[in-house]
Image: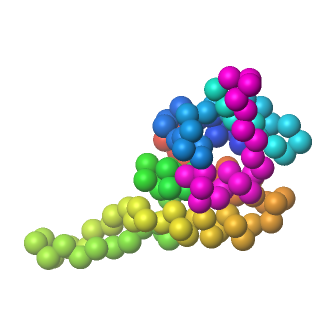
């Protein structure tokens, strides 16, 4: 899967990049071109796509599209049945924002492809 495929799939599943109902049209020289019609294009670089304003990480975390790492889970104690229950910890977008901001530009695309799950993968 390419990053372009990943972004388009997220859009199809309801992600609105930067709060707009735009589709990813093209990628040219590291610039991602979004828009509904050719005269209404918005361009962003990969760093902007992973920013808080793009709503990428918020959408991915709310929809449980993070590839399952132990860091994304938290145990909760249920007093009714005296068991610890493994639950998805949804408010992790801040963690992923920070992780992506710390990545070098050369590692960012691979990081997104390795971190975001859009299919039922194991």
Question: Residue furthest toward the left?
Answer: 80
Vertical comparison of 51 with 78: above or below: above
Quadrant containing the N terminus is: top right
Residue 19 percent across, percent down from the top left? 54, 44
Residue placed at 43% from the left, 49% from the top? 63
- Residue 38 sits inside the magenta stretch: yes
Residue placed at 60% from the left, 65% from the top? 97
Residue 96 percent across, percent down from the top left? 58, 64
The span picked out in magenta is: 37-55
> Residue 113 versus residue 60: which sits nearer the camera?
60
Count the marks. 0
Residue 106 percent across, percent down from the top left? 84, 59
- Coloured how? rainbow
Residue placed at 64% from the left, 58% from the top? 51
Vertical comparison of 119 with 69: above or below: above
In the shown orientation, is residue 56 left or right of residue 111? left
In the shown orientation, is residue 43 left or right of residue 83? right
Question: Residue furthest toward the right?
Answer: 29
Tell me, yes or no, if residue 67 can be seen here.
no
Tell me, yes or no, if residue 61 can be seen here.
yes
> Residue 112 versus residue 18: which sits nearer the camera?
18
- Residue 43 sits inside the magenta stretch: yes
Residue placed at 49% from the left, 50% from the top? 59
In the shown orientation, is residue 73 left or right of residue 67? left
Residue 73 percent across, percent down from the top left? 42, 67
Occupied quadrant, residue 76: bottom left
In the shown orientation, is residue 88 left or right of residue 57? left
Occupied quadrant, residue 43: top right
């Amino acid at each position: 899967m390419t990053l372009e495929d990943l972004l388009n799939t997220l859009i199809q599943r309801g992600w609105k990049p930067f709060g707009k109902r735009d589709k990813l049209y093209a990628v040219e020289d590291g610039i991602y071109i979004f828009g509904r019609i050719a005269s209404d294009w918005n361009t962003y670089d990969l760093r902007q796509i992973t920013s808080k304003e793009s709503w990428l990480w918020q959408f991915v975390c709310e929809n449980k599209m993070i590839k399952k790492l132990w860091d994304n889970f938290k145990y909760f104690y249920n007093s009714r049945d005296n068991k610890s229950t493994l639950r998805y910890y949804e408010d992790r977008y801040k963690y992923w924002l920070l992780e992506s901001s710390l990545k070098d530009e050369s590692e960012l695309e691979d990081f997104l492809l390795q971190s975001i799950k859009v299919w039922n993968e194991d």
